[in-house]
């Protein structure tokens, strides 16, 4: 007998990449927003 549970669907192992990617996208977006608010035509 197999020790695995049989499911009607495939269960995959947890991956850290979706959480890592979403946090990175949030930090990148908030950094750009902060940078654009500090940037003025005088600085260019």
Image (spheres, grey):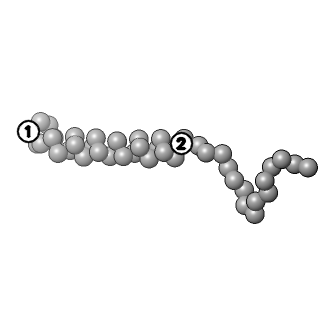
Of callouts 2 and 1, the N-terminal one: 2
Q: Quadrant of residue 25?
A: top left
Q: Which residue is mark 1?
A: 42
The furthest residue to the top: 43
20 relative to 28 in the view: left or right = right
Which x, y percent locates residue 39? Answer: 16, 41
Crowding at dot 2, Cα within 10 Å, few <14 / some 14-19 / many 20+, comes out as few
Residue at figure coordinates x 52%, y 46% from the top left: 18
The one of 10 and 44 positioned closer to us in this rendering: 10
6 relative to 27 in the view: left or right = right
Which x, y percent locates residue 13? Answer: 66, 45
Which x, y percent locates residue 11? Answer: 69, 53
Quarter the C terminus occupies: top left
Q: Which residue is mark 2?
A: 17
Instruction: Relative to 11, say whether 39 is above or below.
Output: above
26 relative to 11 in the view: left or right = left
7 relative to 41 in the view: left or right = right
- Measured in 3D between alpha carbons, the distance from the residue under mark 2 to the one under mark 1, in whole angstroms, is 40 Å
Instruction: Relative to 10, say whether 15 is above or below.
Output: above
Residue at figure coordinates x 41%, y 41% from the top left: 24
The furthest residue to the left: 42
């Amino acid at each position: 007998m197999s020790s695995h549970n049989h499911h009607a669907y495939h269960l995959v192992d947890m991956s850290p990449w979706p959480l890592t990617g979403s946090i990175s996208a949030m930090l990148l977006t908030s950094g750009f927003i902060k940078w654009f608010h500090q940037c003025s035509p005088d600085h260019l």
